[in-house]
Amino acid sequence: MCQNIVHAAVRLEDTIKERGHNCMHEMVYANRELSWLKFNERVLEEAARKDVPLAERLSFLSIYQSNLDEFFRVRVGTHVDQMHSDQEIRDNKTNMTSAEQIQCIFAAVHRLNTRKDEIFTELMMELEDAGVRVVDFHTIDEEESRHLEGFFDREVAPLLSPIVVDKRQPFPFLRNQEIYAAAVLKKPSKKKERVGIVACSSSALPRLVQVSERPNTYMLSEELILHFISKIFSNYEIKAKSLLRVSRNADIDADALYDEDLDYREFMSGLMKKRRRLAPIRLEMSRDLDKRIVKLLCKHLETEEYAVFKNNTPLDLSYLFMLQNTLRGNSELFYPHRSPRQPASIQRQIPVLDQVRESDKLLSYPYESIKPFLTMLHEAANDPKVVSIKMTLYRVAKDSQVVEALCEAAENGKDVLVLVELKARFDEENNIEWSRRLEEAGCTVIYGLNGYKVHSKLCLITRMGESGQPEYYTQIGTGNYNEKTARLYTDYSVLTHDQEIGRNAAQVFQALAMGETLKKSGPLLVAPHCLQNRVLEMIDEQIALAKRGEEAYIGVKINSLTDKKIIDALMAASQAGVKIEMVVRGICCLLPGVPGKTENIRIVSIVGRFLEHSRIYIFGTGKQRKIYIASADFMTRNTLRRVEVAAPIRDEALQEEILSAFDVMLRDNCQAWNLCSDGVYRRNRNDQPKLNAQETFFQQAYDREQKAAAKK
């Protein structure tokens, strides 16, 4: 079955390439879904690198799988829905139908899973060399086997609830991404076979079971259950058995279901319950089962046979993070310790608000700490002259200090307006709880807009100045107000006293409070109406310069590039002679270096210790240069279907800091991959001294902090 899918997809890829050649001399577009899979492949390859410490390679392998799980639930789920639509929907860049995309996706995943199996086997061997073993019943001795059988009888069997599927007992609901043991059962005196199902997930049952008194030797609990499944179904002969794991569609369009007469927060709570029961889109198995049984399982689950994947690795790799804890005593198996530093531009003894009044401040996470921003929020919460704080929240930490500061401000009598985006996918429940906490503290909470997600990272503090007039302190970021991800994601955050920017931010909040979007904007670029068009205008400006024979340049750092209007504008800029350099971490639907089309475009992807998340837009050179940091990628969903904000960096010193960082990323020859004109990513290798951009930025942050401390 896998071979047939792969061969069919190869034929389809050839057809698509030919279709593209008929449209133009060279292919310049890449499919969004297949491009994302190439990004996840780069994550997977980090798990294979010998120069990455073993414990960190375990993380990359687990992240690869969790990424893929979400991809199936969201992106594949979307295409499954579109396949059942009356309208034929095609990708606007490669002209592929949803059915064609799913065919290519499944073939690519089968290939990637083969590579994943190879890497997993190698990692387990290295883990054993480090003193940690994960075993099965083929690799343990009789004494360990007896110990495990006793453990199963005493501790595991009483927790299980087996089901035999028959006319009286329908096939059970398999919860999303939980593991089940399944067996083909037969009574000795009867011909008919039945299916037995046992849920392996229980909060009372550890995922890793200690095999014996020997330290650091474990067995996965689901393998223990599967091995002793004959004890569970003792009245039957076990004809075959396997572990199962189902991924369910999570692609719920909240806006399409929204009813204005309902309480929005309660509506979203109900939506989360519905998501847990949505249709299966993938079935993973740990063992081969007879085709007849696979067909039966697919019938019960109402899924297609091509959506069945046989895995040679455990079905859920999240336990690899647990194994990391057993290695903590060996620091060589982890990255060297790094912690966010105090920004050299901000002094601890002076109020942050006062320092921002003097000059703009730029925080660079995770190299610099988020604490100065948190300090500024707490200062505002307790400053008698501060009259209001307004903020957009998309994803926040479980124990959010940001929310606590906002609650503190409201309890101190400040006017606090918070837009909590309840449609932040997979963070809805967390945001629902925080919205309740904010309301209880006296904050005014609004829940986004009908038809648009609010993805901006915008905070506005209004304070009465010395002249008795209100003054604005504005923060605009590329990442969420989340203290945890601020230590894991690379992001920028600018703090400014620029009153023009502050007034523009106030207009954004005024529109949001009225359930509207900003139709016209000032210095800020504000989607959905005032970002894509402004970006296109600035691209056109560079095209005009190039046509006059003047120096023209575009530099962009984003997570994803899918917006066809922007892609086509960049292509036109390349053809006009504009030099374009891009750092695109994930999806990239534009192929660079295609003669006559994109030969002036270079695209780099950086995948490393920290998740590249910051967005930078650079247009022009010299005194005419414009630099922005933004919450928006160049994706249509960001530019036209979300509220996003990009902020100009006007301070010359901060501009130079960003330009210098962008140059370092382009020169990275340790973690960077070059996207080539054939659509293949190849590691950026050259004869220059080794340069790891992320390590360089951290070292710079340490050096700046030490230099600032030496001046005191």
Image (spheres, rainbow, N blue to C red):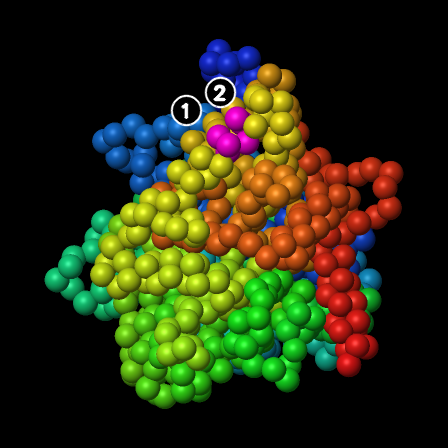
Q: Can you give x and y, in whole percent of width and height, for residue 19 in the image?
A: 47, 15
In-front residue for pair 639/188: 639
- Which badge, 2 or 1, comes first in the chain's sequence? 2
Residue 437 lies, with reference to residue 316, above or below; the image says below
Please say whether residue 645 is visible from this viewpoint: yes
Q: Which residue is mark 2?
A: 16
Q: Which residue is mark 1?
A: 95
Q: Quadrant of the C terminus?
A: bottom right
Q: Is residue 541 magenta?
A: yes
Q: Amino acid at mark 2?
A: Ile
Q: Residue at x 75, y 46 (%)?
A: 668
Q: Which residues are magenta?
A: 539-544
Q: Amino acid at mark 1?
A: Asn
Please say whether residue 286 is visible from this viewpoint: no
Q: Can you give x and y, in whole percent of width and height, for residue 327 in the image?
A: 74, 71
Q: Is residue 479 magenta?
A: no
Q: Is residue 241 left or right of residue 140?
A: left
Q: Secondary structure at mark 1?
A: loop
Crowding at dot 1, Cα within 10 Å, few <14 / some 14-19 / many 20+, comes out as some
Crowding at dot 2, Cα within 10 Å, few <14 / some 14-19 / many 20+, comes out as some
